[in-house]
Image (tube, rainbow, N blue to C red):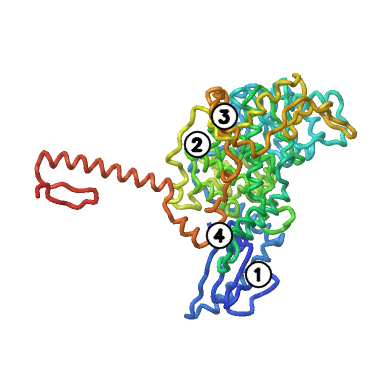
Amino acid sequence: MRLNHSLISSNFFLLVANQSKIKIVTPSLSLKFVPEELLIYCRGFRLMHFHFSDNGLKTEAFSMTNTMAKNQQLISSVVQQEAMLRSLDKTEIATPMDYPTHMFESAMDWENEIERLGATSWRVTPLNERCDTCTSLSKYFVVPCKLLDNDLKNTFAHFQQRRIPRWSWHHPGGGDLLRSAGFQTNTDPDKEDLRSIRSLLFGNHSQSVIIDTTEDLPSVADIQASFLKLRALCCSDTSTPVSNEKWLSNLEGSHWLDHVRSCLKKASEVSMLLSEGNRSIVLQEPEDRDINCLMTSLVQVLSDPHSRTLSGFQSLVQKEWVSAGHPFMQRINHFKQSDKEESPVFLLFLDCVWQCLQQFPTAFEFTESYLLALHDSTYNLFCSTFTHNCPWDRIRGSQRHSSSQTYTPVNGWRDIVREKIFLNGDYKSVEEVKSAPPTVWEWSLFYRHSRRQQFRNPMYHIRKQAVLNGNGLMHNTDMLGVTDPSNVYLLSKGVLVLQSPFFPRKSVTVSKRGGRRSQSIESLLDEEKQLRSNISSQSSMGDLLLPLCVGPWVRLWKRCYLQCATEVQGVNQHPSVASLAEELKILEERLKNLHVNIQDERQNGSVLTDVNGVTSSSYR
C-alpha cells in the first residue's frame, strides 16, 4: 500500500514549533521563523518530537512545518476527502485476520449468532437488504419469528430515523436485549401497527421493560466537552510544574471519570435485569446510534463470556457499532468537517472495558495493549472500519469502482469479475478477485508480530460462576415482582413506570407503579459485604461481571491518556503481562533442562551446565 502524506497529516490536532518559546501553528497562520524543535500532538494522545540540528536541516524544518500546516487545512475540504476515500476504496490488500471476526453484513453471520445463543424464537429478516427501508441500519437484523415482514414494514414510520426495535442478545436464562430508536410522536398507528409494535417490544415474552439510555447517562455533547477538558489536561505543557492537587481537581472537573462511572453503573443495572427473569429489555435512545451502541456492547461484555474473547469482542464491535450505524465519520471527525458533531463515544466504551479489565484481569482474553491498539486505530484512515457513518455509506464506497459485488463475512468485500473464455470448444470461467480496503481487524498490516503477541492475556480463563465485585443491585432483584404480565414498563431512576398506553402520544400521561428506588452510589460499598455473604444464592446469574464503580475503583487510563508525559512513556517500556508470561515459559524450559543435566551429570560424574549456559566442574 502506498502511503499518502495527507492521510498522515490528518491524524494530529495541534502543531507546535519551539524556538525559545512555544508557538501554535495553524493552517491560517504560517510559521515565520525556523524552528529548533517540532512537537506534534496526535489525536490519540501521542506526542511526537522532532529535533532539528544545525547541520543543514533547519531549512527543511521550515518547509516541513509549513507543509504540514497547509495539508491540515487541505484535508478538511470535501474534494480532498472524496479523493482520499476513493484512494482507500482502491486499496488492494488482503491478509488473514489474526482472530476470526463476524462482520454482521451477511444473513449467515446473524444466523450463527442466533444459533450460538440458542435464541430459537428469533429470525433474520432481509427486509432492509437494499438499505432502502432504513439507510442507517444494517442489511439484515433480527426480529421475532411470529412477526411477518409484511406487518413489519408498517412499523418503521413510527420510530425516529425508521430504526425499529431489534434483537441484540439472548441471555441463557431466557431474557432478551433489544435496542430501538425513540417513538415518533407525530404519527398515529392503527390497531394493526400497534399490534406489530407490541410484538417487537415484547419479543416472545409476557413482560417488557424500556430503559431510556439518555437518563442518568451523558449526552453526546457532554462526552465531547469532557473529552476536550481531559485532552487539554493530559496534553498540557509538562515544563510548567502543576501541583498534584490542582491536576486532580482539573481531572475531576472534566467529569470524564463520572461518565465512565455512570455507564458502568447503568450497564450493571441492565445486566442484573436480564439475569433476573424471562423478559425483554429494550434500550431506547432518540436516534439509537450513540449511547445505545455503548450500552448494548457494555452489557454484553459484562454478561457474555464470548464477548470477552478476542474474536467475540471484535465481532461485538462489528455488530453493535459498525453494522448498527454508529456515525464514526462524524463522531471521530477525521476530516474536521463539523466539530459540533464530534464526540468520542466509542473511546468512552473502550475506557469502560479497560476499567472492567483492571478489576477482572483473568476474565478477558485480550489485554490492555490490545485496547490501546484499538484505541489508536480509530484514527487510522488506511482501514475502512471507522471511516463511514453506516453500512450504506460503506456499500456505496465499495461500489465506486465496481459494478458487481458478493460478500464474504471473514475476508471482507470482494469484487468478482467473470469472463467467459471460449477455449477448445468449452467455456472457461475466470475470476478476477480484487481485495477491499482492509479492516482494522487485520492487525498484521499495522502491527509487528511482537506487538500482536501482547494482545492475548496469558492469565485468561473462563469463569463458571458470577463474579460479584460490589455493584450488584440487590435492591432491584424484586423490582418486577409487583408488575402485571403483558405490560410495558419504563425503568426511570429505579422506579417502574407503567407505559399506558405503551405507545406515547402527545398529551398522554404515564402512571407510576410500586417500585423500589435505586440506592445512592455511597451505599454500594455497604452492599458489597451483603453480596459477598450471599454468593451461593446468586449462582443463577451465570458468568456475570459486576464491576465496582465508586471511589478509587474507577481510575484514569494512564497508558492511554498520559502518553504525552515523559515519565509515563518510560512506564510504557516496562514488560507487559504477555511478555512476562513468555519469559516465564523460557525460564521454565531452562529449569527443566537444568534438572535433566543435573541428573545426567550425577550419573556420569563430569561437568554440568547452569541456566545461563556457563559450565563448571561438578567436583571442586
Numbered tag placed on residue 454 in the rendering: none
Categorize mark 3 by other alpha carbons within 10 Å: few (<14), some (14-19), many (20+).
many
Distance between the alpha carbons at the discs numbered 4 and 2: 29 Å
- The spot of residue 141 in percent (x, y) is 67, 33
Sequence order check, earlier mark of 2 and 3: 2
Instruction: Choose mark 1 or mark 4, whichever is in front.
Output: 4
Left-right relation of 225 to 591: right
Left-right relation of 356 to 280: left
Helix, strand or loop at label 3? It is: helix
Instruction: Choose mark 3 or mark 1, whichever is in front.
Output: 3
Write down the residue under mark 2: 363
Amino acid at circle 4: Arg
Left-right relation of 384 to 199: left
Instruction: Choose mark 2 or mark 3, whichever is in front.
Output: 3
Numbered tag placed on residue 531 in the rendering: 3
Sequence order check, earlier mark of 4 and 2: 4
Numbered tag placed on residue 70 in the rendering: 1
Instruction: Choose mark 2 or mark 1, whichever is in front.
Output: 2
Query: Which residue occupies the foreground of this view, 138 or 292?
Result: 292
Q: Quadrant of residue 121?
A: top right
Label pair 3/4, CB-CB below 8 angstroms: no
Helix, strand or loop at label 1? It is: helix
Q: Quadrant of residue 25?
A: bottom right
Write down the residue under mark 4: 46
- The spot of residue 416 in percent (x, y) is 58, 43
Distance between the alpha carbons at the discs numbered 2 and 3: 19 Å
- The spot of residue 556 in percent (x, y) is 57, 50
- The spot of residue 293 in percent (x, y) is 66, 40
Query: Which residue occupies the foreground of this view, 481 or 544?
Result: 481
